[in-house]
Image (cartoon, rainbow, N blue to C red):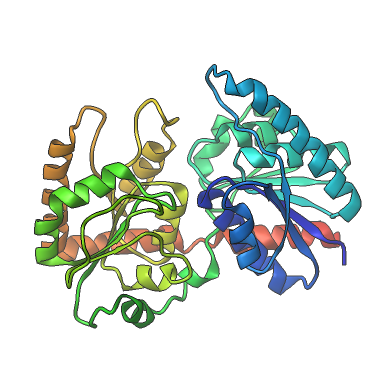
Amino acid sequence: MIPIAFTGGGTGGHIYPGLAVAMILRELLPGRIFWIGSAAGMDRSIVEGAGFEFFGVPSGKLRRYFSLKNISDIIKVNAGFWAARCILKKEKPGLLFSKGGFVSVPPCAAAASLGIPVFTHESDYSPGLATRINARFARRIFTAYEDTAAFFAPAFREKVTAVGNPVRPGFRNANAAAGRAFMEIGPEERVLLVLGGSQGAREINELIRECLPVLTKYYTVVHQTGPGQDWDLPASERYRPYAYIREEMPQVLAAAELVLGRSGAGTVWEAAAAGKPMALIPLRGSGTRGDQVENAGVFEKAGAAVVIGGNASSLKETAVVLTRTIIELAENAELRNAMTAASERIGNRDGAELIARIILSAVTGEV
């Protein structure tokens, strides 16, 4: 069977959705699947931990602003192109699927130069720079939302198919009891799960420090602080901090009554797959292109989330709003149930399954 190549990385948000597709494809089409990712960072450990072969290539960062680092990164991107081209030429995959991130651009360009079909997926409401570049090489462009097609140039829109966001199968059939056992929490305890993404979120951590006395009146707070964070709030019966939750995350999420976190695509879609109501604090400001604000807005409009914070809000002001919001949600079961139903409606669309079957048809010649 002709192998299939995957690429993407830099953050968990670019790796885990790709792995969701790869896992389903592995069941549908026995054969070799390999991944091309960054030679540095978390990519290798996550991909190999999921049981897939990994090839590392040099990786530069794509910036929208002037920086002297752009000069050295151009050299890295060029090196990444030639390294990826050598891998693809040797391994001869029938197709390359990209999940985005700056590391995915050289492999997509290399695949196109070799005549290997490129499929790519965008998780956010508006496409990032890597997806905009990869669209030039792609035969199919998958998106999480129908409206995302409008962000592409007219020549690319006929390639766009909205499929939802890929989520690993474990999030759809997770065992809440197993999550409670991992956290050592009893069956009657209400759980507020706090997430800041795989790298943590300093603002959210500081908000938890500010609001914890109130939050623990209603919930056992399970808090992913982020690896490498200098965190000094000790664990207690009503507060459980974890630097990072990996394999157990689907079960922990299943045990949660409410999710509080950023609004990266991975966070909101995994919570939706688990049918959880959300309180979202999107990353804002000059250091972001606004994708989290857009993602949060979609889920708020659908009734699955409440959005907290704004550009002008201080930490103290946001803490007041956060506390008021969590109290309202904790005391209003009818509102939580309505948000749960809205979340389930979004999460029922299995993007990983849809993408895997389209890839299967492409490599087997059925389309």
- Quarter containing the N terminus: bottom right
**Near-viewer residue (58 or 315):** 58
Given residues 310 and 228, the one toward you in this image is 228
- Residue 81 percent across, percent down from the top left: 78, 36
- Numbered disc total: 0
The correct choice, above or below, for 8 with respect to 73 in the image is below
Q: Nearer the viewer, residue 94 or 56?
A: 56
Q: Which residue shows up at 17% across the image and 73% down it?
A: 237
Which image quarter holds the C terminus? bottom right
Residue in view at x 58 percent, y 48 percent:
41
Q: Position of residue 31 (x, y in %)?
A: 80, 69
Instruction: Reply above or below: 340 against 228.
Output: below
Q: Nearer the viewer, residue 275 or 367?
A: 275
Q: Is residue 59 above or below residue 348?
A: above
Vertical side of 150 occupied by 186: above or below? below
Residue 60, picture quadrant: top right
Quadrant of the rendered structure where residue 188 is?
Answer: bottom left
